[in-house]
Amino acid sequence: MSDDARRIGSRSRTIAEDFALEQPLLMPLPKEPFETGRLFTPRVDRYGQIPVRTNRYSAVSSGRCNTLSC
């Protein structure tokens, strides 16, 4: 990859060197598929917020209907 030789900030090791240290510690991917996201169709409440499960997020209004991605 093109990022392998890159350094993040002032770190002494490259991305490839850090990955080589971390790779043996990684667990294998699960064999069965798993859900990585959920589709919601929330409505903006009177406070300009959108409820998603147990959280509330501010929704900036531009005066027209928009689709939001989370």
Image (cartoon, helix red, strand yellow):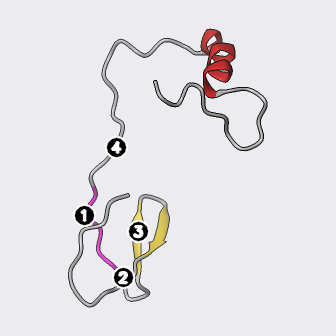
Amino acid type of the residue that numbered disc 3 sits on in the rendered structure:
Pro
What whole-number distance in Å separates the C-alpha atoms at marks 2 and 4? 23 Å
* Amino acid type, label 4: Gly
Q: Nearer the viewer, residue 56 or 6?
A: 6
The quarter holding residue 33 reads top left
Secondary structure found at label 4: loop
Marks 3,4: beta carbons within 8 A: no
Q: Is residue 40 above or below residue 51?
A: above
Q: Are marks 2 and 4 in contact (CB under 8 Å)?
A: no
At which x and y percent is residue 19?
Answer: 62, 20
Judging by the rendered image, the residue that carries numbered circle 2 is 45
For label 2, count other residues whose C-alpha is less than 10 Å away and answer few (under 14), some (14-19) or many (20+): few
Cβ–Cβ under 8 Å for marks 1 and 2:
no
Badge 2 amino acid: Asp
The residue identified by callout 1 is 41
For the record, the magenta segment spans 40-45
Q: Farthest top residue?
A: 24
Q: Which residue is mark 4?
A: 37
